[in-house]
Image: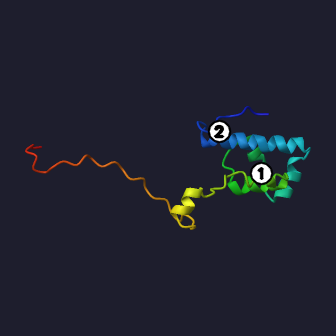
Amino acid sequence: MTQKIDFKIASSAEIETYLCARLEAVRLSQNMNQSELAKRASISLRTLTRLATGEGGVSFDTIIRVMLALNLHHHLENFIPDPTVRPIERVQFKGKQRQRARRKPTEAEPWTWADDGSTK
């Protein structure tokens, strides 16, 4: 099994390699050969080999197909957290869901009198 990585500082390539290695470990733990998994996932054996060796360039669709073929569907819901609305936002938005993000206001320069006698 591969060592755990710190997802905050790891590059996207490192994360992809780590996740692909985890999927390969699950495949082996289920005693499934690559050709059987490729058939179940409806992907080519070459694509699965690229995933297993961590060559990179594996699509998100391929990862989902392999997860489903390995019966890991129950982990897909937790893959991205649910952006539940906080109670205070329900009051602010009057029960409506947020439709877009807004920029945070920037701090303006302190206000001064235009005729304070100083010249720039």
Out of 50 and 75, give the one closest to the viewer: 75
Relative to residue 71, is residue 19 depicted above or below?
above
Q: Residue furthest right?
A: 31
Q: Going by the image, does 104 lie left or right of 64?
A: left
**Residue named by callout 2:** 14
Kindly identify which residue carries mark 1: 75
Residue at (79, 45) in percent of width and height: 23
Residue type at tag 2: Glu
Q: Quadrant of residue 16?
A: top right
Q: Is residue 108 left or right of residue 52?
A: left
Q: How is the image coloured?
A: rainbow
Q: Tag on residue 52? A: none
> Where residue 88 appears, x then y in whole percent?
55, 57
Q: Residues within 10 Å of mark 2 (few under 14, many from 20)?
A: some
Q: Foreground: 95 or 72?
A: 95
- Label 2 sits on a secondary structure element that is helix
Asked which secondary structure carries label 1, the reply is helix
Find the residue positioned furthest to the left.
117
Residue 24, percent from left and from top: 80, 43
44 or 24, nearer to the observer: 24
Residue 52 position within the rendered picture, expressed as x and y whole percent measured from the top left: 77, 43
Can residue 13 be seen in the rendering of this structure? yes
